[in-house]
Image (spheres, helix red, strand yellow):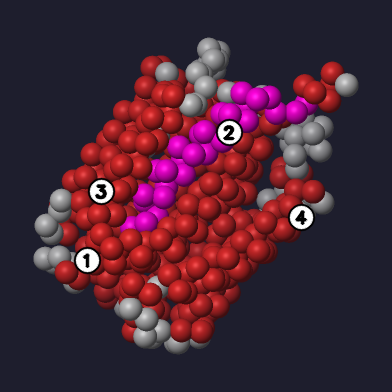
Amino acid sequence: MTALITDRMSREERRAGISLAAVFALRMLGLFLILPVFAIHARELPSGDDAALVGMALGAYGLTQACLQIAYGAASDRFGRKPVIVVGLLLFAAGSFVAAGASDIYLVIVGRVLQGSGAISAAVTALAADLTREQHLTKVMAMIGSSIGLMFALSMVAAPLLYSLVGMSGIFALTGVLALLAIALVLKVVPAAPMVPRQPAWPSFIEVLTDGRLQRLNFGVLALHLMLTAMWVVLPAELVQAGGLPVSDHWQVYLPALLLSFLVMVPAIVLAERFAHVKLVFNLAIGMLIVVEAGFGLFANGLHSLFVCLTLFFTAFNVLEAMQPSLISRIAPSHAKGAALGIYNTTQAIGLFLGGVIGGTLAKNAGALAVWTVGAALAAVWLILGLTLPASALRRPEAAGQKHL
């Protein structure tokens, strides 16, 4: 009986997982709310008709994230997780308010760069690792990953409605308020971090940086967020032009697409974990991205075809967004999880930046088809890497005998 009790998540572990997932959720909701509507709004700004600048505004956040993610993780080792997270959230809120008051596309870019300087993802996931026993870390990482997927879903529905009510400035201001609410959660709800003995940072960093299994997952999160950001450079305009749907009505496409995607996502993840089909579900989701990107480029020339492609994209994105942080924490050695998560979040941020820049440049110079073609090619490379990932590396620790294979 004692063994059964100790094998369950403790009350503090559940509190840590839920509260840290909520911190992530509040921050990511603010970021995702911008994606479906900014490309349309930018046309009202001076120089906002330049697709390359619009892409830069969308991706600039990822640039500073990529530069500072590992530094924030290291700072949290030295100065404590919570102080670093609070500083990052304050910078993120400041950038949101700068963007809210922007009168041209260039000041929006400045605000997005400042938002990205609050690069707290590695520090938050490291705090989750501090507060959770090894056998339950995968569950907490799955909570965080699922919260990101849920916020993405909510934002796709809420953003067009909010845009029609409060405009882009209101959405940016709301993003800042959400960051301030996340600070209150960190200070009042998230449990205090225990004293954790630290391994020397440099050897741990090199160990996870050169791990081929983690490299595959890092490429995957880069590709996924590159495709995500690039998609929002061109998709809102396609819904308006090819779909004949004004921005304020885009939620009529997003809501049913998201609901259908969640109907598939939940059983897919349950199937993957309960019946040890993680690799199968993982690679099927990547394969779906290839179909989606090709479908957008070749067949999505009306509202119904755009809806089908969007539903498939949401399904694949939510599955992969929920699975990948869990897989990173599962594969990384216990003494180097913070380093592994820092690198993972850095490559995610690079993907966000490159998605905006590449998507905007391609859309400007070669049209939307080029954006979808590059996305399909990236997904194909990712699928090859996923197929070569050892299935043993994706098993739960208890299933793999707690071995580092």
Mark closer to the observer (4, 2): 2
Q: Residues within 10 Å of mark 4 (few under 14, many from 20)?
A: some
| Disc with the residue nearer the chain's start (3 vs 1) | 1
Mark closer to the observer (4, 3): 3
Q: Amino acid at mark 2?
A: Gly
Q: Which residue is mark 1?
A: 42
Left or right relative to 387: residue 210:
left
Q: CA distance from mark 2 to mark 1?
A: 37 Å
Q: CA distance from mark 4 to mark 2?
A: 22 Å
Q: CA distance from mark 4 to mark 3?
A: 40 Å
**Where residue 223 appears, x then y in whole percent?**
48, 57
Q: Amino acid at mark 3?
A: Ala
Q: Are marks 4 and 1 in contact (CB under 8 Å)?
A: no
| Disc with the residue nearer the chain's start (2 vs 1) | 2
Q: Amino acid at mark 4?
A: Leu
* Range shown magenta: 7-35
Q: Which residue is mark 2?
A: 17
Q: Which residue is mark 4?
A: 271
| Disc with the residue nearer the chain's start (3 vs 2) | 2
Q: Are marks 2 and 1 in contact (CB under 8 Å)?
A: no
Question: Is any atom of residue 197 visible in this view?
Answer: yes
Circle 1: element type: helix
Circle 3: element type: helix
Mark closer to the observer (3, 2): 3
Is residue 28 covered in magenta? yes
Q: Is 225 drawn above or below residue 303 in the view shown?
A: above
Q: Is the N terminus in the top left, top right, bottom left or bottom right quadrant?
A: top right
Q: Which residue is mark 3?
A: 173
Mark closer to the observer (3, 1): 3
Q: Are marks 3 and 2 in contact (CB under 8 Å)?
A: no
